[in-house]
Amino acid sequence: GKMMWEKGKEVGVTMWEMGKEDPRRVIHSIKVGFAMTLASSLCLLQKEPPPFQGIGLNAIWAVITVVILLEFTAGATLRKGLNRVIGTVLGLLLVLIVERLSAHRPIPRAVFMGWTIFVFGAAATYMRFIPIIKKKYDYGVLVFILTFSMILVPNYYVNNTISMVRDRFYTIAIGCVMCLFLSLLILPTWSGDDLHKSTITKLEGLAQSVEACVGEYFGDAQRKEIQDKLPKDSIDQNCIKVLDSKYTDETMAFYASSEPRCRGNCYKSPWQQYVKFGAALRRFGYTVMALRGCLHTEIKTPPSVLALFKDQCTRLAGEVSKVLVELANSMRNRRHFSPEILCSHLHEALQDLHTALQSQPQILSDSTNRKDSRISPRTSFEANSSPLYESKTARPPEQVHGIQKVLRPQRSKIVIASLEFSEALPLAAFVSLLIEAVARLDHVIEEAKELGRIARFKERKPGDDIV
Amino acid sequence: GKMMWEKGKEVGVTMWEMGKEDPRRVIHSIKVGFAMTLASSLCLLQKEPPPFQGIGLNAIWAVITVVILLEFTAGATLRKGLNRVIGTVLGLLLVLIVERLSAHRPIPRAVFMGWTIFVFGAAATYMRFIPIIKKKYDYGVLVFILTFSMILVPNYYVNNTISMVRDRFYTIAIGCVMCLFLSLLILPTWSGDDLHKSTITKLEGLAQSVEACVGEYFGDAQRKEIQDKLPKDSIDQNCIKVLDSKYTDETMAFYASSEPRCRGNCYKSPWQQYVKFGAALRRFGYTVMALRGCLHTEIKTPPSVLALFKDQCTRLAGEVSKVLVELANSMRNRRHFSPEILCSHLHEALQDLHTALQSQPQILSDSTNRKDSRISPRTSFEANSSPLYESKTARPPEQVHGIQKVLRPQRSKIVIASLEFSEALPLAAFVSLLIEAVARLDHVIEEAKELGRIARFKERKPGDDIV
């Protein structure tokens, strides 16, 4: 009893939180309930005088249409509605044709109908595999098959095709109109807005990732508080979310592209540009992911070497992060940004890093040089011991298989760690990747500019850029 | 006329190719057509003697069930069937309860029903937002709402609830049994097989990517033929496909997990391990993507420097690629592999690269040293000219805005290219990333071993490894 009460309370809290997180969910649910009640009242009120009288039991199709069509976003509803109308109309047409043809056949009518259903069912199912139809009209083809078989089969008895076709068409049309009204005019939820917001979130997530990553690499104490606030996993997750966003982006853009709306004077829908921008972000994200990979490398660069570049790298990462945040802000306010102001600090930071690397040429030189500095040579000697040569020479017989199994996983890590030259190598890679990230950021900025142009963002005012 | 004929021929060819590419599509279409005919014959043959007589018009629900349930793979069909049964049963139960409650109410029955529909419709819609339900039972909740409203509303007139509920249940059960029979016993298509195959394809795609990438970086003439055969884009696409595979992988694994089959003696379904293996492959893929990023870097390393490491890097990449191909083969034949034999050449190649890097320590040293070698110093001087300093000092007034706009996109590329030290930096990054790739390959091998263990692959025979 008490256990169930606790459990029930927990579920209740979850549901409440879910609604608070996105109140549009509550609104959507109420809309669906309302639409269903309205549609069924067409049926329940049949004892009233016309014009409702004629609908009767067929009104159930209005209810079904409403339940199936009313999706969370306006774009999805429109897309489904379009499919439903096309599918229904084609299905009804086919029924009329088949009825006409089956009238004067020598073969029994049931056999003719059976064959028709087989042929059209199989053909339509096969068509669903065509990529363009699968992507855009999958639901329409399904509705076509359903409508076709649902009218043709009962019609074998009832034989009032015309009136059945008419009723079905009207009820589904009523359902569609209801859905369009509710999803477009009453507190609409736009796919395009979701896409816009998720793009902003991605930018901010990447900004955090870059900064946290560089901070962590140089063991920055100042960043500790950020890391504590946001656990490492969530930063990784931010980045992975960007990299995995292709499917959701494309779905949202697909729905958004059927949403009939324009802010002000836009003449072309910018949604495909959002997808392109997302692709540019993913390309940038791969570099960030590679940067994060440097954190887990097996070869540790000595802190004394790291310290030489810490300030420059941290500054550069900070500037990259600032650019991303500024892009997010300009997108949030739907205004243009100034690439010049945006990037000037970035280029200064890049130049600083350049200068630092030039002034410390010995860092990237051979290990003999490095041993002169403050690094204890012991670590590299230790690492350079046996396992490497074992792996090279001794291919173990099956007897020692068990031991090998235990040793194996660590082996190539040991091999890597024993590469003597390599203490500076990961640092070089890190710096190079950071520079690569800046280069890709350029591409992101390009696409953002193009996006601003196509979506006709507001003109930038002089005070807007707080870089 | 002729245009249409051409167009029609083209569509026909596409359809034919589609079927040849995967004949299971044709089989699936025929299955659906057959099932529909069978289900409608329940209705069409009603004039026959019992036991078919009782079904009559309600048999249309068997047709609908068949059309909706019969999915391409067995797993998807099962999952949908389960949802349909649960949804239908719950919906029917609710109808019975509401009927019982509405019998002795003071308020009009139509009003009571309207409220019931509103409350349950809204509540069920809201429940669809709960992540676990959205993922696993979304369709079930939809069926629940549909069943509930489709019985309750007409029942307002007909008032033979019990028989309606019974008929609906029977017809849907018949449809489900038909679907299960066709999808599980007649030429079944398994989601698990698709997942297995797509994993193999991914491994092979990555193997190609790694080899092509290193080959291209060192301008390998021998690789030219591979590059001509496979255009660069398709290699990139292979890699991106792996990185974007999360959604499809998880869907396939989700369906596969409900497929009731075991090869031989497996006791635990390995599908979640496939997902984990896919994640490891994606992590590996990020490094490959970063490696490919090095191809497009703005700073060109002189060929003479590249030539020093070409053989070692090419060999290492070749070994990585071989390991991936061998993993793909062992997976295709469902047998274990020997990590020792698999990796020994890899470790030798790694050691070679190490030796090469140690013997050429001056490569990674400062630019002054490098200028002593065969590299013409002119390129770096040229690159070091004005644009860099312009970007640092001159923040242009609005008048020259137009010119700036033209210059801007190239600017940070120029800044990067002018970094004098940096000719060796990308090479260092490339080598470091290659080593990082080897480290991550270890993780891939781990997961593959675990996969072999869970899925109970065959034992390896001595002659199996043709590394």
Image (cartoon, coloured by chain):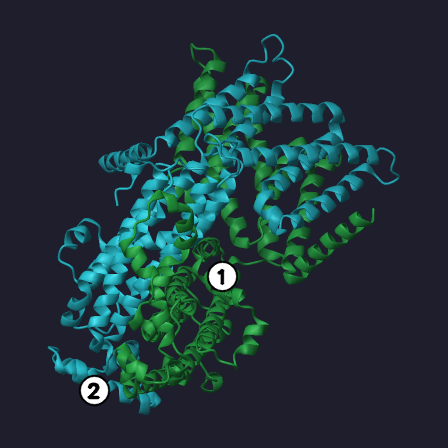
Chain colours: A green, B cyan
From the viewer's side, name the closer residue of A126 and A31: A126
- Say what amino acid the circle numbered 2 marks: Ser
Classify residue A427 as left or right of residue A152: left
Residue A420 point in image, percent of width and height? 30, 71
Label 1, label 2: how far apart the Cα atoms are: 43 Å
Report helix, strand or loop for mark 2: loop
Task: State the residue at coordinates (34%, 49%).
Answer: B340
Task: State the residue at coordinates (79%, 34%).
Answer: B97
Neighbours of disc 1 within 10 Å: few (<14), some (14-19), many (20+) = many
Task: State the residue at coordinates (71%, 58%).
Answer: A16
Any mark on residue A140, and which?
none
Residue A72 point in image, percent of width and height? 58, 52
Extreme front residue here? A399
Q: Is residue B58 visible?
A: yes
From the viewer's side, name the closer residue of A85 and B142: B142
From the viewer's side, name the closer residue of A69 and B64: B64
Q: What residue is disc 2 on?
A: B385
Classify residue B217 as left or right of residue A17: left
| Mark whose residue sits in front, 1 or 2 | 2
Extreme top residue here? B49
Q: What residue is disc 1 on?
A: A195
Neighbours of disc 2 within 10 Å: few (<14), some (14-19), many (20+) = few
> Tag 1, which chain?
A
Q: Is residue A47 above or below residue B117?
A: above
Quadrant (top left/top right/bottom left/bottom right) for the N terminus of chain B: top left
Quadrant of residue B102 within the rendered picture: top right
Classify residue B75 as left or right of residue B445: right
Q: Is residue A458 visible?
A: no
Residue A81 point in image, percent of width and height? 52, 45
Q: Is residue A213 above or below residue A106?
A: below
Q: Is residue A55 above or below residue B115?
A: above
